[in-house]
Image (cartoon, rainbow, N blue to C red):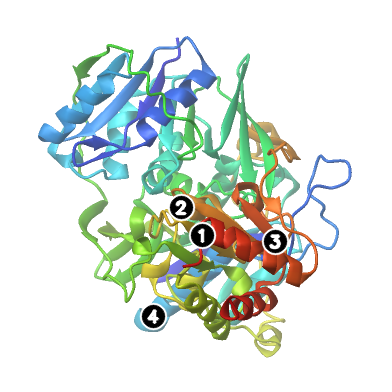
Amino acid sequence: MEILVCIKRVPDNEENEIELNSAGNDIDRDDLVYSVNEWDNYAVEEAIQIVDNVGGSVTVVSIGDEEVDEVLRREMAMGAEKGIMLTDDAFEGSDGKGIATILKGVVEKGNYDLIMTGAQADEGYAQIGGMLAAMMDVPFASLVNKIEVGDKTLKIGREIEGGNQEMNEIDLPCVLSIQTGINEPRYVGIRGIRKVASVEIPEFGASDLGIDAGTIGEAAAKVKRVDYFMPDLGDGAEMLEGSTEEIIDKLIEILKANGGLS
Amino acid sequence: MAKLYAYISHKNGVADDTALELLTAAAKIDAGASVTAIVTGSGADLDKVCQEMAASYKEVLKIDNEAMAYPNAEIIRKALVEIIKDDDIVLLPHDTFGMDLGPGLSIKTDSPFAADIVDIEGVDGSTLKLIRQEFAGQVYTHVTCDISSGAILNIRPGVCKADESKAAGGSVTETSVSADLSAGRRYLETVIPEAGDVDITKSDVLVSVGRGIEDEENIEIAQELADAMGAVVSCSRPIVDAKWLEQSRQVGTSGKTVKPKVYMAMGISGSFQHLGGIKGGFMIAVNKNPKAPIFQVANVGVVADILEFMPELTEKIGDL
Protein backbone atom coordinates (compact mmCIF):
# COMPACT_ATOMS: atom_id res chain seq x y z
CA MET A 1 0.00 0.00 0.00
CA GLU A 2 1.39 3.39 -1.03
CA ILE A 3 0.33 5.97 1.54
CA LEU A 4 0.70 9.75 1.47
CA VAL A 5 0.30 11.61 4.76
CA CYS A 6 -0.15 15.39 4.67
CA ILE A 7 1.38 17.05 7.70
CA LYS A 8 1.47 20.61 9.02
CA ARG A 9 3.94 22.44 11.22
CA VAL A 10 2.02 24.29 13.93
CA PRO A 11 2.67 26.11 17.21
CA ASP A 12 2.61 23.42 19.87
CA ASN A 13 -0.50 23.91 21.98
CA GLU A 14 0.97 22.01 24.90
CA GLU A 15 4.22 23.93 25.02
CA ASN A 16 2.81 27.42 24.41
CA GLU A 17 0.33 29.71 26.03
CA ILE A 18 -1.11 31.41 22.96
CA GLU A 19 -1.58 35.11 23.62
CA LEU A 20 -2.16 38.25 21.62
CA ASN A 21 0.84 40.44 20.79
CA SER A 22 1.10 43.95 22.23
CA ALA A 23 -0.50 45.48 19.12
CA GLY A 24 -3.38 43.06 19.55
CA ASN A 25 -3.60 42.10 15.88
CA ASP A 26 -1.68 38.82 15.87
CA ILE A 27 -0.64 36.18 18.34
CA ASP A 28 2.67 36.69 20.06
CA ARG A 29 4.98 34.62 17.87
CA ASP A 30 8.18 35.26 19.84
CA ASP A 31 9.45 32.12 21.51
CA LEU A 32 6.67 29.93 20.11
CA VAL A 33 7.60 26.26 20.06
CA TYR A 34 6.54 24.55 16.83
CA SER A 35 5.97 20.89 16.20
CA VAL A 36 4.04 18.59 13.92
CA ASN A 37 0.26 18.94 14.26
CA GLU A 38 -0.82 16.35 16.86
CA TRP A 39 -3.50 14.76 14.64
CA ASP A 40 -1.01 14.41 11.77
CA ASN A 41 1.39 12.54 14.03
CA TYR A 42 -1.29 9.91 14.71
CA ALA A 43 -1.89 9.68 10.95
CA VAL A 44 1.79 9.02 10.26
CA GLU A 45 1.92 6.35 12.97
CA GLU A 46 -1.17 4.67 11.52
CA ALA A 47 0.31 4.74 8.02
CA ILE A 48 3.54 3.15 9.26
CA GLN A 49 1.62 0.41 11.07
CA ILE A 50 -0.39 -0.38 7.92
CA VAL A 51 2.78 -0.61 5.83
CA ASP A 52 4.40 -2.80 8.50
CA ASN A 53 1.46 -5.19 8.12
CA VAL A 54 0.80 -5.23 4.39
CA GLY A 55 3.91 -3.73 2.80
CA GLY A 56 4.33 -0.60 0.74
CA SER A 57 5.70 2.76 1.78
CA VAL A 58 4.78 5.95 3.55
CA THR A 59 5.48 9.41 2.13
CA VAL A 60 5.01 12.55 4.22
CA VAL A 61 4.35 15.90 2.55
CA SER A 62 4.19 19.39 3.98
CA ILE A 63 3.65 22.88 2.59
CA GLY A 64 6.01 25.63 3.73
CA ASP A 65 9.54 26.91 3.56
CA GLU A 66 12.71 25.32 4.98
CA GLU A 67 11.15 25.38 8.45
CA VAL A 68 9.02 22.34 7.59
CA ASP A 69 12.18 20.30 6.96
CA GLU A 70 12.36 19.63 10.70
CA VAL A 71 8.84 18.20 11.00
CA LEU A 72 9.22 16.15 7.82
CA ARG A 73 12.42 14.58 9.18
CA ARG A 74 10.80 13.94 12.53
CA GLU A 75 8.05 11.94 10.83
CA MET A 76 10.58 10.21 8.58
CA ALA A 77 12.46 9.18 11.70
CA MET A 78 9.25 7.46 12.83
CA GLY A 79 9.36 5.33 9.71
CA ALA A 80 8.07 7.32 6.75
CA GLU A 81 10.34 6.40 3.87
CA LYS A 82 10.05 9.58 1.80
CA GLY A 83 9.46 13.26 2.43
CA ILE A 84 8.24 15.95 0.04
CA MET A 85 8.38 19.70 0.64
CA LEU A 86 6.03 21.99 -1.25
CA THR A 87 7.53 25.46 -1.39
CA ASP A 88 6.50 28.45 -3.47
CA ASP A 89 5.77 32.11 -2.73
CA ALA A 90 2.57 31.57 -4.70
CA PHE A 91 1.30 29.20 -1.96
CA GLU A 92 1.27 31.91 0.70
CA GLY A 93 -2.08 33.09 1.96
CA SER A 94 -3.97 30.12 0.52
CA ASP A 95 -7.27 29.24 2.15
CA GLY A 96 -8.38 25.65 2.67
CA LYS A 97 -9.36 25.19 -0.94
CA GLY A 98 -5.98 26.56 -2.04
CA ILE A 99 -4.15 24.14 0.25
CA ALA A 100 -6.22 21.21 -1.04
CA THR A 101 -5.48 22.32 -4.62
CA ILE A 102 -1.73 22.28 -3.92
CA LEU A 103 -1.95 18.85 -2.28
CA LYS A 104 -3.97 17.50 -5.19
CA GLY A 105 -1.03 18.48 -7.38
CA VAL A 106 1.38 16.34 -5.39
CA VAL A 107 -1.10 13.44 -5.14
CA GLU A 108 -1.32 13.36 -8.94
CA LYS A 109 2.47 13.13 -9.25
CA GLY A 110 2.43 9.87 -7.30
CA ASN A 111 0.43 6.68 -7.30
CA TYR A 112 -1.11 6.50 -3.85
CA ASP A 113 -3.70 4.02 -2.61
CA LEU A 114 -4.43 5.95 0.54
CA ILE A 115 -4.10 9.59 1.51
CA MET A 116 -4.28 10.68 5.12
CA THR A 117 -4.53 13.98 6.91
CA GLY A 118 -5.05 14.83 10.56
CA ALA A 119 -8.71 15.38 11.46
CA GLN A 120 -7.87 19.05 12.08
CA ALA A 121 -4.97 21.37 12.83
CA ASP A 122 -4.32 24.59 14.73
CA GLU A 123 -6.96 26.62 12.91
CA GLY A 124 -9.65 24.00 13.52
CA TYR A 125 -11.43 24.03 10.15
CA ALA A 126 -11.17 20.23 9.71
CA GLN A 127 -11.43 20.76 5.95
CA ILE A 128 -8.40 19.68 3.92
CA GLY A 129 -9.05 15.94 3.67
CA GLY A 130 -12.69 16.32 2.64
CA MET A 131 -11.85 18.96 0.04
CA LEU A 132 -9.00 16.93 -1.42
CA ALA A 133 -11.18 13.82 -1.73
CA ALA A 134 -13.96 15.77 -3.47
CA MET A 135 -11.47 17.33 -5.91
CA MET A 136 -10.12 13.86 -6.72
CA ASP A 137 -13.56 12.24 -6.79
CA VAL A 138 -12.56 9.54 -4.31
CA PRO A 139 -14.37 8.55 -1.11
CA PHE A 140 -13.63 10.29 2.18
CA ALA A 141 -14.10 9.61 5.87
CA SER A 142 -13.43 12.07 8.67
CA LEU A 143 -12.49 11.41 12.30
CA VAL A 144 -11.21 7.91 11.61
CA ASN A 145 -10.23 6.01 14.74
CA LYS A 146 -9.82 2.47 13.37
CA ILE A 147 -8.52 1.02 10.10
CA GLU A 148 -8.55 -2.62 8.96
CA VAL A 149 -7.04 -3.29 5.56
CA GLY A 150 -9.05 -5.49 3.21
CA ASP A 151 -8.82 -6.30 -0.47
CA LYS A 152 -9.34 -3.05 -2.42
CA THR A 153 -11.34 -1.72 0.49
CA LEU A 154 -10.75 -0.67 4.08
CA LYS A 155 -12.98 -1.24 7.05
CA ILE A 156 -12.84 1.95 9.04
CA GLY A 157 -14.28 3.27 12.28
CA ARG A 158 -15.29 6.92 12.66
CA GLU A 159 -15.63 8.59 16.00
CA ILE A 160 -19.15 9.95 16.31
CA GLU A 161 -21.07 11.64 19.11
CA GLY A 162 -21.30 10.03 22.53
CA GLY A 163 -18.14 7.95 22.15
CA ASN A 164 -19.81 5.66 19.62
CA GLN A 165 -17.96 4.30 16.62
CA GLU A 166 -19.48 4.31 13.13
CA MET A 167 -18.12 1.42 11.08
CA ASN A 168 -17.89 1.80 7.30
CA GLU A 169 -16.47 0.03 4.31
CA ILE A 170 -14.60 2.38 1.99
CA ASP A 171 -13.16 1.80 -1.48
CA LEU A 172 -9.50 2.46 -2.27
CA PRO A 173 -8.11 4.87 -3.23
CA CYS A 174 -9.57 7.19 -0.62
CA VAL A 175 -8.79 10.02 1.74
CA LEU A 176 -9.07 9.59 5.51
CA SER A 177 -8.76 12.24 8.20
CA ILE A 178 -7.36 10.69 11.35
CA GLN A 179 -8.56 11.30 14.90
CA THR A 180 -6.22 11.32 17.89
CA GLY A 181 -6.19 8.17 20.00
CA ILE A 182 -6.29 5.77 17.01
CA ASN A 183 -2.87 4.44 18.08
CA GLU A 184 0.05 5.29 20.31
CA PRO A 185 2.56 7.23 18.21
CA ARG A 186 6.09 5.97 18.70
CA TYR A 187 8.73 8.05 20.40
CA VAL A 188 11.36 9.64 18.20
CA GLY A 189 14.79 10.13 19.69
CA ILE A 190 17.69 12.30 18.57
CA ARG A 191 19.38 9.21 17.11
CA GLY A 192 16.41 8.47 14.92
CA ILE A 193 16.36 11.99 13.56
CA ARG A 194 20.13 11.86 12.91
CA LYS A 195 19.63 8.73 10.84
CA VAL A 196 17.42 10.57 8.36
CA ALA A 197 19.36 13.84 8.47
CA SER A 198 20.99 13.27 5.10
CA VAL A 199 18.00 11.83 3.24
CA GLU A 200 17.19 14.11 0.35
CA ILE A 201 13.77 15.77 0.50
CA PRO A 202 12.61 16.90 -2.94
CA GLU A 203 11.00 20.34 -3.22
CA PHE A 204 8.21 21.22 -5.61
CA GLY A 205 6.65 24.54 -6.52
CA ALA A 206 3.41 25.45 -8.30
CA SER A 207 4.77 24.93 -11.82
CA ASP A 208 6.33 21.54 -10.89
CA LEU A 209 2.88 20.44 -9.76
CA GLY A 210 1.11 21.84 -12.79
CA ILE A 211 -0.97 24.17 -10.65
CA ASP A 212 -2.47 27.34 -12.09
CA ALA A 213 -1.12 30.02 -9.73
CA GLY A 214 -4.45 31.85 -10.05
CA THR A 215 -6.25 29.08 -8.14
CA ILE A 216 -4.06 29.31 -5.02
CA GLY A 217 -2.52 31.89 -2.72
CA GLU A 218 -4.01 34.98 -1.19
CA ALA A 219 -5.60 36.33 -4.37
CA ALA A 220 -7.68 33.17 -4.81
CA ALA A 221 -8.59 32.85 -1.13
CA LYS A 222 -12.26 33.49 -0.42
CA VAL A 223 -11.99 32.79 3.29
CA LYS A 224 -9.55 35.04 5.11
CA ARG A 225 -8.57 35.65 8.70
CA VAL A 226 -8.65 39.40 9.30
CA ASP A 227 -7.18 39.55 12.80
CA TYR A 228 -6.85 37.89 16.17
CA PHE A 229 -8.64 39.32 19.19
CA MET A 230 -9.90 38.52 22.64
CA PRO A 231 -13.52 39.50 23.22
CA ASP A 232 -14.76 40.87 26.50
CA LEU A 233 -15.95 37.60 27.96
CA GLY A 234 -17.46 39.05 31.09
CA ASP A 235 -16.20 38.24 34.53
CA GLY A 236 -15.63 34.53 34.07
CA ALA A 237 -14.66 32.57 37.14
CA GLU A 238 -14.31 34.08 40.59
CA MET A 239 -10.56 33.65 41.00
CA LEU A 240 -9.41 32.55 44.45
CA GLU A 241 -6.25 34.30 45.56
CA GLY A 242 -3.96 34.28 48.55
CA SER A 243 -1.66 31.65 50.02
CA THR A 244 -2.33 28.03 49.04
CA GLU A 245 -3.67 27.43 52.53
CA GLU A 246 -6.09 30.36 52.27
CA ILE A 247 -7.21 29.26 48.84
CA ILE A 248 -7.84 25.71 50.02
CA ASP A 249 -9.81 26.93 53.07
CA LYS A 250 -12.01 29.06 50.77
CA LEU A 251 -12.37 26.22 48.31
CA ILE A 252 -13.50 23.79 51.01
CA GLU A 253 -16.21 26.26 52.09
CA ILE A 254 -17.30 26.58 48.45
CA LEU A 255 -17.35 22.81 48.03
CA LYS A 256 -19.49 22.40 51.15
CA ALA A 257 -21.92 25.09 50.01
CA ASN A 258 -22.40 23.45 46.61
CA GLY A 259 -22.70 19.82 47.63
CA GLY A 260 -19.15 18.91 46.67
CA LEU A 261 -18.29 17.42 50.04
CA SER A 262 -20.54 14.94 51.69
CA MET B 1 -31.62 35.47 -5.47
CA ALA B 2 -29.56 33.55 -3.01
CA LYS B 3 -31.40 31.11 -0.83
CA LEU B 4 -30.51 30.15 2.71
CA TYR B 5 -30.64 26.47 3.62
CA ALA B 6 -30.17 24.68 6.93
CA TYR B 7 -29.41 20.97 7.01
CA ILE B 8 -31.37 19.25 9.77
CA SER B 9 -29.65 16.44 11.65
CA HIS B 10 -32.04 14.01 13.28
CA LYS B 11 -32.16 10.62 14.91
CA ASN B 12 -35.07 8.31 15.77
CA GLY B 13 -37.61 10.86 14.56
CA VAL B 14 -36.29 13.72 16.68
CA ALA B 15 -34.41 16.73 15.31
CA ASP B 16 -31.02 17.48 16.80
CA ASP B 17 -30.59 20.55 19.04
CA THR B 18 -28.65 22.17 16.20
CA ALA B 19 -31.79 22.23 14.00
CA LEU B 20 -33.17 25.38 15.64
CA GLU B 21 -29.72 26.83 16.35
CA LEU B 22 -29.11 27.02 12.60
CA LEU B 23 -32.32 29.07 12.25
CA THR B 24 -30.83 31.63 14.63
CA ALA B 25 -27.54 31.57 12.73
CA ALA B 26 -29.38 32.13 9.42
CA ALA B 27 -31.13 35.19 10.88
CA LYS B 28 -27.72 36.66 11.68
CA ILE B 29 -26.88 36.47 7.97
CA ASP B 30 -30.20 37.89 6.80
CA ALA B 31 -32.83 38.71 9.41
CA GLY B 32 -35.61 38.87 6.85
CA ALA B 33 -34.74 35.78 4.85
CA SER B 34 -37.02 32.81 4.47
CA VAL B 35 -34.86 29.87 5.47
CA THR B 36 -35.40 26.44 3.97
CA ALA B 37 -34.77 23.36 6.10
CA ILE B 38 -33.44 20.33 4.22
CA VAL B 39 -34.37 17.05 5.86
CA THR B 40 -33.15 13.77 4.41
CA GLY B 41 -33.96 10.28 5.57
CA SER B 42 -36.55 7.62 5.15
CA GLY B 43 -40.03 6.66 6.32
CA ALA B 44 -42.09 7.67 9.33
CA ASP B 45 -39.19 9.12 11.32
CA LEU B 46 -38.46 11.51 8.47
CA ASP B 47 -42.11 12.60 8.27
CA LYS B 48 -42.13 13.31 11.98
CA VAL B 49 -39.01 15.49 11.79
CA CYS B 50 -40.37 17.36 8.75
CA GLN B 51 -43.60 18.17 10.59
CA GLU B 52 -41.64 19.32 13.63
CA MET B 53 -39.45 21.56 11.44
CA ALA B 54 -42.40 23.13 9.60
CA ALA B 55 -43.31 24.89 12.84
CA SER B 56 -39.98 26.72 12.75
CA TYR B 57 -38.99 26.88 9.07
CA LYS B 58 -41.17 28.49 6.38
CA GLU B 59 -40.12 25.88 3.87
CA VAL B 60 -39.13 22.31 4.61
CA LEU B 61 -37.60 20.31 1.80
CA LYS B 62 -38.06 16.61 2.37
CA ILE B 63 -35.95 14.00 0.59
CA ASP B 64 -37.22 10.51 1.33
CA ASN B 65 -34.89 7.81 0.07
CA GLU B 66 -33.99 4.41 1.48
CA ALA B 67 -30.32 5.13 0.65
CA MET B 68 -30.45 8.03 3.11
CA ALA B 69 -31.93 6.10 6.02
CA TYR B 70 -28.53 6.45 7.63
CA PRO B 71 -26.88 9.88 7.09
CA ASN B 72 -23.97 9.00 4.80
CA ALA B 73 -22.28 12.28 3.88
CA GLU B 74 -21.27 11.10 0.42
CA ILE B 75 -24.85 10.23 -0.53
CA ILE B 76 -26.38 13.31 1.05
CA ARG B 77 -23.84 15.44 -0.77
CA LYS B 78 -25.15 14.14 -4.08
CA ALA B 79 -28.66 15.18 -3.11
CA LEU B 80 -27.60 18.63 -1.92
CA VAL B 81 -25.58 19.33 -5.06
CA GLU B 82 -28.82 19.00 -7.04
CA ILE B 83 -30.63 21.49 -4.81
CA ILE B 84 -28.00 24.15 -4.19
CA LYS B 85 -27.66 26.75 -6.92
CA ASP B 86 -25.13 29.48 -7.64
CA ASP B 87 -24.92 31.77 -4.64
CA ASP B 88 -27.03 29.79 -2.16
CA ILE B 89 -25.77 29.54 1.40
CA VAL B 90 -25.96 26.27 3.32
CA LEU B 91 -25.69 26.03 7.09
CA LEU B 92 -24.50 22.77 8.66
CA PRO B 93 -23.79 21.83 12.26
CA HIS B 94 -20.04 21.51 12.89
CA ASP B 95 -20.44 18.05 14.37
CA THR B 96 -19.08 14.70 13.23
CA PHE B 97 -21.55 14.68 10.33
CA GLY B 98 -20.95 18.30 9.33
CA MET B 99 -17.20 17.70 9.30
CA ASP B 100 -17.77 14.74 7.00
CA LEU B 101 -20.06 16.65 4.61
CA GLY B 102 -19.08 20.33 4.56
CA PRO B 103 -15.60 20.40 2.98
CA GLY B 104 -16.50 18.12 0.05
CA LEU B 105 -19.83 19.87 -0.48
CA SER B 106 -18.03 23.19 -0.82
CA ILE B 107 -15.85 21.77 -3.60
CA LYS B 108 -18.78 20.21 -5.45
CA THR B 109 -20.84 23.43 -5.25
CA ASP B 110 -17.81 25.65 -5.92
CA SER B 111 -18.57 27.66 -2.79
CA PRO B 112 -16.16 28.73 -0.07
CA PHE B 113 -16.18 26.79 3.20
CA ALA B 114 -15.94 28.17 6.70
CA ALA B 115 -16.13 25.88 9.70
CA ASP B 116 -16.45 25.89 13.45
CA ILE B 117 -18.07 29.32 13.31
CA VAL B 118 -18.86 30.66 16.78
CA ASP B 119 -20.66 33.84 15.72
CA ILE B 120 -21.84 35.73 12.64
CA GLU B 121 -21.47 39.51 12.59
CA GLY B 122 -23.39 40.08 9.36
CA VAL B 123 -23.03 40.74 5.66
CA ASP B 124 -21.34 43.73 4.03
CA GLY B 125 -21.94 43.60 0.27
CA SER B 126 -20.70 40.17 -0.76
CA THR B 127 -18.57 39.75 2.36
CA LEU B 128 -19.82 37.68 5.26
CA LYS B 129 -18.14 38.52 8.56
CA LEU B 130 -17.61 35.60 10.89
CA ILE B 131 -16.05 34.94 14.26
CA ARG B 132 -14.00 31.83 14.95
CA GLN B 133 -11.52 30.58 17.50
CA GLU B 134 -8.07 29.12 17.05
CA PHE B 135 -5.70 27.17 19.27
CA ALA B 136 -8.49 25.33 21.07
CA GLY B 137 -10.26 28.53 22.10
CA GLN B 138 -7.21 30.43 23.36
CA VAL B 139 -7.71 33.26 20.82
CA TYR B 140 -10.57 34.55 18.65
CA THR B 141 -10.38 35.64 15.02
CA HIS B 142 -12.49 37.73 12.66
CA VAL B 143 -12.84 35.95 9.34
CA THR B 144 -14.26 37.23 6.06
CA CYS B 145 -15.92 34.93 3.57
CA ASP B 146 -16.67 36.06 0.01
CA ILE B 147 -20.22 34.79 -0.58
CA SER B 148 -20.60 35.94 -4.19
CA SER B 149 -20.65 32.27 -5.20
CA GLY B 150 -22.52 31.11 -2.09
CA ALA B 151 -21.00 29.43 0.96
CA ILE B 152 -21.02 26.29 3.06
CA LEU B 153 -20.96 27.32 6.71
CA ASN B 154 -20.42 24.87 9.57
CA ILE B 155 -21.75 26.38 12.79
CA ARG B 156 -20.40 25.15 16.12
CA PRO B 157 -23.17 23.37 18.05
CA GLY B 158 -24.40 25.22 21.13
CA VAL B 159 -23.17 28.72 20.24
CA CYS B 160 -26.40 30.06 18.74
CA LYS B 161 -29.43 30.05 20.99
CA ALA B 162 -32.12 27.81 19.48
CA ASP B 163 -34.98 29.80 17.95
CA GLU B 164 -37.90 28.24 19.83
CA SER B 165 -40.58 30.67 18.60
CA LYS B 166 -42.12 28.01 16.32
CA ALA B 167 -44.08 30.70 14.51
CA ALA B 168 -43.20 29.88 10.91
CA GLY B 169 -46.31 27.91 10.00
CA GLY B 170 -44.29 26.41 7.18
CA SER B 171 -45.04 23.72 4.69
CA VAL B 172 -43.30 20.53 3.66
CA THR B 173 -42.34 19.99 0.02
CA GLU B 174 -41.02 16.66 -1.14
CA THR B 175 -38.30 16.42 -3.74
CA SER B 176 -36.38 13.53 -5.20
CA VAL B 177 -32.84 12.96 -6.32
CA SER B 178 -31.94 11.95 -9.85
CA ALA B 179 -28.28 11.08 -9.18
CA ASP B 180 -27.03 7.53 -8.76
CA LEU B 181 -26.86 7.13 -5.00
CA SER B 182 -24.27 4.38 -4.82
CA ALA B 183 -21.30 5.39 -2.70
CA GLY B 184 -17.61 4.60 -2.30
CA ARG B 185 -18.17 4.53 1.42
CA ARG B 186 -20.85 2.30 2.89
CA TYR B 187 -22.20 2.41 6.43
CA LEU B 188 -22.01 -0.92 8.22
CA GLU B 189 -22.97 -0.50 11.87
CA THR B 190 -22.58 1.64 14.96
CA VAL B 191 -20.49 0.17 17.75
CA ILE B 192 -21.42 1.31 21.24
CA PRO B 193 -18.50 1.05 23.66
CA GLU B 194 -18.73 -1.31 26.58
CA ALA B 195 -19.72 0.22 29.87
CA GLY B 196 -16.70 0.95 32.01
CA ASP B 197 -16.01 0.07 35.62
CA VAL B 198 -17.76 3.23 36.83
CA ASP B 199 -20.61 5.32 35.46
CA ILE B 200 -19.39 8.92 35.63
CA THR B 201 -22.86 10.19 34.69
CA LYS B 202 -24.21 8.93 38.03
CA SER B 203 -21.73 10.75 40.26
CA ASP B 204 -22.68 14.02 42.00
CA VAL B 205 -19.08 15.11 42.14
CA LEU B 206 -16.43 14.62 39.46
CA VAL B 207 -12.71 15.20 39.76
CA SER B 208 -11.89 15.55 36.09
CA VAL B 209 -8.31 15.59 34.85
CA GLY B 210 -6.76 16.92 31.66
CA ARG B 211 -3.31 17.36 30.17
CA GLY B 212 -2.17 19.10 33.36
CA ILE B 213 -1.90 15.67 34.99
CA GLU B 214 1.23 15.21 32.83
CA ASP B 215 1.90 11.55 33.55
CA GLU B 216 -0.03 8.30 33.94
CA GLU B 217 1.38 7.82 37.45
CA ASN B 218 -0.20 11.11 38.55
CA ILE B 219 -3.74 9.80 37.93
CA GLU B 220 -3.36 8.34 41.42
CA ILE B 221 -3.15 11.88 42.85
CA ALA B 222 -6.55 12.69 41.34
CA GLN B 223 -7.95 9.37 42.56
CA GLU B 224 -6.84 10.17 46.11
CA LEU B 225 -8.60 13.55 45.96
CA ALA B 226 -11.72 11.88 44.55
CA ASP B 227 -11.65 9.26 47.32
CA ALA B 228 -11.37 11.98 49.97
CA MET B 229 -14.31 13.84 48.44
CA GLY B 230 -16.48 10.81 47.76
CA ALA B 231 -16.17 11.66 44.07
CA VAL B 232 -15.35 9.82 40.87
CA VAL B 233 -12.44 10.54 38.51
CA SER B 234 -13.33 11.57 34.95
CA CYS B 235 -11.14 13.12 32.29
CA SER B 236 -10.77 15.04 29.04
CA ARG B 237 -9.90 13.52 25.69
CA PRO B 238 -6.06 13.61 25.76
CA ILE B 239 -6.09 11.32 28.81
CA VAL B 240 -8.08 8.70 26.91
CA ASP B 241 -5.91 9.17 23.80
CA ALA B 242 -2.88 8.44 25.98
CA LYS B 243 -4.72 5.33 27.32
CA TRP B 244 -4.28 6.48 30.92
CA LEU B 245 -8.00 6.12 31.61
CA GLU B 246 -10.80 4.22 29.89
CA GLN B 247 -12.98 5.95 27.32
CA SER B 248 -15.98 5.45 29.63
CA ARG B 249 -14.47 8.14 31.88
CA GLN B 250 -14.21 10.76 29.13
CA VAL B 251 -16.40 13.88 29.39
CA GLY B 252 -17.19 15.67 26.13
CA THR B 253 -19.03 15.49 22.84
CA SER B 254 -17.08 12.38 21.90
CA GLY B 255 -17.47 10.98 25.41
CA LYS B 256 -20.10 11.16 28.13
CA THR B 257 -22.47 14.01 28.91
CA VAL B 258 -22.50 14.71 32.64
CA LYS B 259 -24.54 16.87 35.00
CA PRO B 260 -22.91 16.63 38.42
CA LYS B 261 -23.50 18.96 41.37
CA VAL B 262 -19.82 19.89 41.34
CA TYR B 263 -17.34 19.52 38.49
CA MET B 264 -13.67 19.89 39.36
CA ALA B 265 -11.76 20.67 36.13
CA MET B 266 -8.18 19.89 37.06
CA GLY B 267 -5.58 20.86 34.46
CA ILE B 268 -8.24 20.98 31.73
CA SER B 269 -7.91 23.85 29.23
CA GLY B 270 -11.60 23.80 28.27
CA SER B 271 -12.02 22.99 24.59
CA PHE B 272 -15.57 23.31 23.27
CA GLN B 273 -15.71 19.56 22.68
CA HIS B 274 -15.02 19.02 26.38
CA LEU B 275 -17.42 21.72 27.59
CA GLY B 276 -20.10 20.27 25.30
CA GLY B 277 -20.26 17.28 27.63
CA ILE B 278 -20.96 19.30 30.79
CA LYS B 279 -24.61 20.20 31.18
CA GLY B 280 -24.74 22.19 34.38
CA GLY B 281 -23.43 22.02 37.92
CA PHE B 282 -20.96 24.18 39.80
CA MET B 283 -17.55 24.24 38.13
CA ILE B 284 -14.25 24.70 39.89
CA ALA B 285 -11.22 25.00 37.61
CA VAL B 286 -7.59 24.66 38.62
CA ASN B 287 -5.02 25.37 35.92
CA LYS B 288 -1.53 26.78 35.91
CA ASN B 289 -2.28 28.83 32.78
CA PRO B 290 -4.19 31.95 33.92
CA LYS B 291 -5.40 32.40 30.30
CA ALA B 292 -6.90 28.92 30.04
CA PRO B 293 -10.36 29.16 28.40
CA ILE B 294 -11.81 27.02 31.21
CA PHE B 295 -11.70 30.11 33.47
CA GLN B 296 -14.25 31.82 31.19
CA VAL B 297 -16.86 29.22 32.02
CA ALA B 298 -15.96 28.03 35.53
CA ASN B 299 -17.69 29.46 38.59
CA VAL B 300 -14.54 29.46 40.67
CA GLY B 301 -10.94 29.36 39.46
CA VAL B 302 -7.53 28.77 40.99
CA VAL B 303 -4.25 29.39 39.17
CA ALA B 304 -2.04 26.57 40.39
CA ASP B 305 -0.21 23.43 39.33
CA ILE B 306 -2.68 20.63 39.98
CA LEU B 307 0.13 18.24 40.88
CA GLU B 308 0.94 20.43 43.88
CA PHE B 309 -2.59 21.66 44.58
CA MET B 310 -4.48 18.37 44.60
CA PRO B 311 -2.40 16.61 47.31
CA GLU B 312 -2.74 19.64 49.59
CA LEU B 313 -6.49 19.77 49.04
CA THR B 314 -6.74 16.01 49.67
CA GLU B 315 -4.86 16.38 52.94
CA LYS B 316 -7.02 19.28 54.14
CA ILE B 317 -10.23 17.42 53.31
CA GLY B 318 -8.87 14.36 55.14
CA ASP B 319 -8.36 16.53 58.25
CA LEU B 320 -11.98 17.71 58.31
Residue named by callout 2: B278
Q: Which of the two labelled residues, at mark 1 and mark 2, occupies the earlier sequence position?
A: 1
Instruction: Say whether residue A127 is left or right of residue B249.
Output: right
Q: CA distance from mark 1 to mark 3?
A: 14 Å
> Looking at this view, is B138 or B314 the one in front?
B314
Type of residue at label 3?
Answer: Val
Residue that numbered label 3 is attached to: B302
Same subunit, tags 1 and 2: yes
Above or below — where is B259 with respect to A44? above
The residue type indicated by label 1 comes to Tyr
Residue annotated with mark 4: A55
Q: Secondary structure at mark 4?
A: loop
Of badges 2 and 3, nearer the viewer stands 3
Task: Please tell me how many numbered marks the rendered image carries.
Answer: 4
* Marks 2 & 3 on one chain: yes
**Mark number, residue A122:** none
Label 2 secondary element: loop
**Residue type of the residue flagged with mark 4:** Gly
Q: Quadrant of residue B35?
A: top left
User: Does label 1 or label 3 sit earlier along the sequence?
Assistant: 1
Establish if A249 lies above or below B179.
below
| Same chain for the residues under marks 4 and 2 in the image | no
Read off the chain for label 3: B
Q: Secondary structure at mark 3?
A: strand
How packed mark 3 is, by other alpha carbons closer than 10 Å (few <14, some 14-19, many 20 or more), is many
Res. B263 mark = 1
Q: Residue at x 46, y 24 (%)?
A: B24
In this rendering, the label closer to the viewer, 4 or 3: 3
